[in-house]
Image (cartoon, helix red, strand yellow):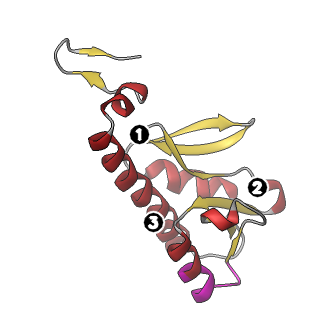
Amino acid sequence: MTAADFRRIALSLEGVEEYPHAGLPAFRVGGRKFASLASQAEGYGNLMLTLKQQAAFVEEAPEIFLPIPGGWGKMGHTHIRLAAPSEDVLTGALRTAWKLRMDKNAKTSRKNPLAAERSGVTDKKRGKRRL
């Protein structure tokens, strides 16, 4: 797989947008990042997972997945070696990170009505897009 495959698969997921993060490609849903190509020069894509998900991916396929070094990795941020996975594995990994972000977005929206406003959700009373 390549960075172009990572991008294609990420953008095929519902509601995903690509945007630059520190000048490098990143992918978000509901205004929040779930994956990036910030490490593509080193041959990696990056996934935002839970520590439990990260541990399962690394245990099952250490030749494909590894925690990002330092503090980011201790928060579940995970490298995926772009050249190593099959399309099914890459798709599953991206879908896992995307689903986690979707679930977190749903919880945040219910707890904090301002989160919907910050993400640009439509104001139902006025039928206008909030900024």
Asked whether residue 78 appears in the rendered view, the answer is no
Looking at the picture, tell me which residue is in the foreground, 8 or 105.
Answer: 105
Q: Residue at x 69, y 51 (%)?
A: 37
Q: Residue at x 19, y 11 (%)?
A: 126
Looking at the picture, tell me which residue is in the foreground, 63 or 114.
Answer: 114
Q: Quadrant of the C terminus?
A: top left
For marks 3 and 1, the one nearer the N-term is 1
Q: Quadrant of the N terminus?
A: bottom right
In the rendered structure, the answer to whether residue 111 lies left or right of residue 28 reads left
- Residue designated by label 1: 30
Would you call the spot at circle 3 few (<14 residues within 10 Å), some (14-19), or many (20 or more)?
Answer: some
Q: Are marks 3 and 2 in contact (CB under 8 Å)?
A: no
- Residue designated by label 2: 40
Magenta stretch: give its range: 56-64
**Location of residue 31 in the rendering, given as x and y in whole percent from the top left corner:** 47, 36
**Location of residue 3 in the rendering, given as x and y in whole percent from the top left corner:** 68, 56
Q: Is residue 108 magenta?
A: no
Would you call the spot at circle 1 few (<14 residues within 10 Å), some (14-19), or many (20 or more)?
Answer: some
Q: Which label lies toward us, 1 or 2?
A: 1
Asked whether residue 123 appears in the rendered view, the answer is yes
Q: Which amino acid type is shown beneath numbered disc 3?
A: Thr
Q: Residue at x 55, y 69 (%)?
A: 90
Looking at the picture, tell me which residue is in the foreground, 49 or 37.
Answer: 49
- Residue designated by label 3: 96
Q: Which amino acid type is shown beneath numbered disc 2?
A: Gln
Q: Is residue 57 magenta?
A: yes
**Location of residue 34 in the rendering, given as x and y in whole percent from the top left corner:** 53, 52
